Image (spheres, rainbow, N blue to C red):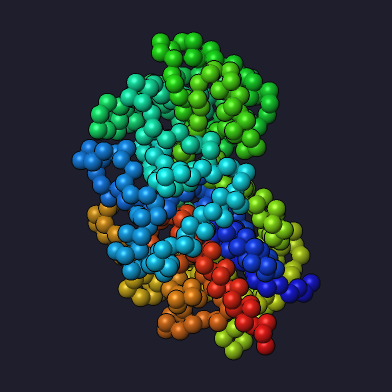
Amino acid sequence: MKENVDVLVIGGGVAGAVAAAHLAALGRSVTLIHKSTGASGYSSGAVDVADSKIDEVPGITDPFDRGYGWLKSAQKIRHKNSYHPYAQCEEQLESLSNALSLLIELTADVSMQRREDGHNHILATQLGTIKRSALVQKSLSCDVATLDSNACVGIVEISGLLGFEAKPVVDMLHWIGQMRTGPSFQVLPIQMSLAPKSGGWRSMVEAAYALDDEQMQNEFVQSLKQALKEVSVKPDQLLFPAVMGFQNPLGILQMIQEATTILSHELLALPFSVPGMRLSKALFSGLSRRQVSCINGKIESYVLQEGKLLSVLMHRAEGQRIELWPKAVILATGRTLAGGIINEGIMNDAIFNLPAWTDQGPVLDKFPLDMTQSLVEAPHELFRLGLACDHQQRPLDQFGELFASNLYAAGSIMKGYDPAKEATGIGVAAVLGFMAADFASTNVFNSSKF
Ligand SMILES: Cc1cc2nc3c(=O)[nH]c(=O)nc-3n(C[C@H](O)[C@H](O)[C@H](O)COP(=O)(O)OP(=O)(O)OC[C@H]3O[C@@H](n4cnc5c(N)ncnc54)[C@H](O)[C@@H]3O)c2cc1C
């Protein structure tokens, strides 16, 4: 089968999805191809944009201080680090704000929350640590910095659920709370039993699938009510491991709130993260609402002629082959976790064999550990590697030459930032996806003039 399309987007994480949605809004025809889950699907489900307090040691400063708003924090990064993708954006970072608004619309199924004052939410994780994020799924949106000093927070442990214990979360959160300027809230563990016939859950993902069942939800609420009878203080807030189903987490939390009269949320999760999987699912339902054609499959080969990608041969997971003739292509295949960058002796992107770069130049056959430093907190080249691109996000080959005039990169496949250390992960993926769509759309417009 042979098809024409304005833009082919390769990759279904945040970068690819935002690029495809923005292209559709610009009136371009788009096809998106993706394979297994990438980093977006493993994330905590909260969107990091920039955190001006990221390098500060809690205790020396108040851990519940929000610092600057996320836009101002991103501007600081932009001015301080010329290598960072935010430095490619305009002075006022309009693309970043627009990309986040688009991401909120696209992921309406998880009801992303943004604070009206432009500051980050301060959220508790399932380790009891805290994290500052610009956007957060509503089910996870308990902002611990807004809790009163006399509030009591119950951390709920579900016996039979492997991988989550309340006690370490309580201890850690209590310890962090002690570093707050002024008195902190109280934290206590709540132990609930699982209904005996379910036989336990080996992971949070398994528990979330089980909790999509209505009868299981009712049993869950009954067990919780029983558990609450056994605690001496009635909590004002309940925080659960992130297992409240895939289909309607807010509905389950609402049901809990009605049964207990206690505000209830989930804690941010570690991989394999149920909220990360919900985010991934929400991206695809958002794309389907925008009539973007999404294909599960992989790229088999491509034709490059006179410095331009002419056609791409795709293999659908169900077996069918499609030859696509796009005017432009966006490569948003993520880093090593998603399979965007692979190490076959030389570190390359997996589709076009474009070399991965660090700030020092192409990685080539460098041993990965040689790109790390002995201090954990030091900047590690290994975590900032990716494709080098020109000012229009077009990837360069190992000689620093443009690979194809109509190929654009987006998201974490691009070099120059460490999503974890800099806490700019999904924010960067969204803005680079948004800007790649603008560049590709202009290319399509120019090519149709001739
Ligand atoms: C464990 C973990 C936790 C994180 N937690 C957070 C967090 O809480 N908050 C935050 O803001 N950031 C977090 N980050 C960083 C953030 O998740 C990433 O920076 C961001 O999601 C990258 O998005 P992306 O679209 O560039 O790539 P990805 O989300 O990795 O998407 C890549 C896509 O490309 C597809 N793909 C790859 N190869 C091919 C191919 N050959 N053909 C077709 N498709 C292909 C994959 O299927 C996938 O759909 C975390 C990262 C990790 C690894």
161, 92: nearer the viewer: 92
Residue at 31 percent of width and 46 percent of height: 67
Residue 211 visible in the current orientation:
yes
Residue at 35 percent of width and 75 percent of height: 361
5 vs 365, left or right, is: right
- In which quadrant is the C terminus drawn? bottom right
Quadrant of residue 296 within the rendered picture: bottom right
Residue 351 visible in the current orientation:
no
Residue 142: x percent and y percent? 45, 33
Residue 446: x percent and y percent? 62, 82
Total marks placed: 0
Residue at 54 percent of width and 69 percent of height: 436
Q: In the image as oriented, which residue stretches furthest toward the right?
A: 1
Quadrant of residue 449 within the rendered picture: bottom right
Residue at 47 percent of width and 54 percent of height: 426
Please tell me whether residue 282 is drawn above or below residue 169 in the rendered image. Answer: below
- In which quadrant is the N terminus drawn? bottom right
Please tell me whether residue 351 is drawn above or below residue 54 in the rendered image. Answer: below
Q: In the image as oriented, which residue stretches furthest toward the front?
A: 117
360 vs 304, left or right, is: left
Quadrant of residue 93 within the rendered picture: bottom left
Residue 27: x percent and y percent? 68, 67
Residue 368: x percent and y percent? 36, 64
58, 324: nearer the viewer: 58
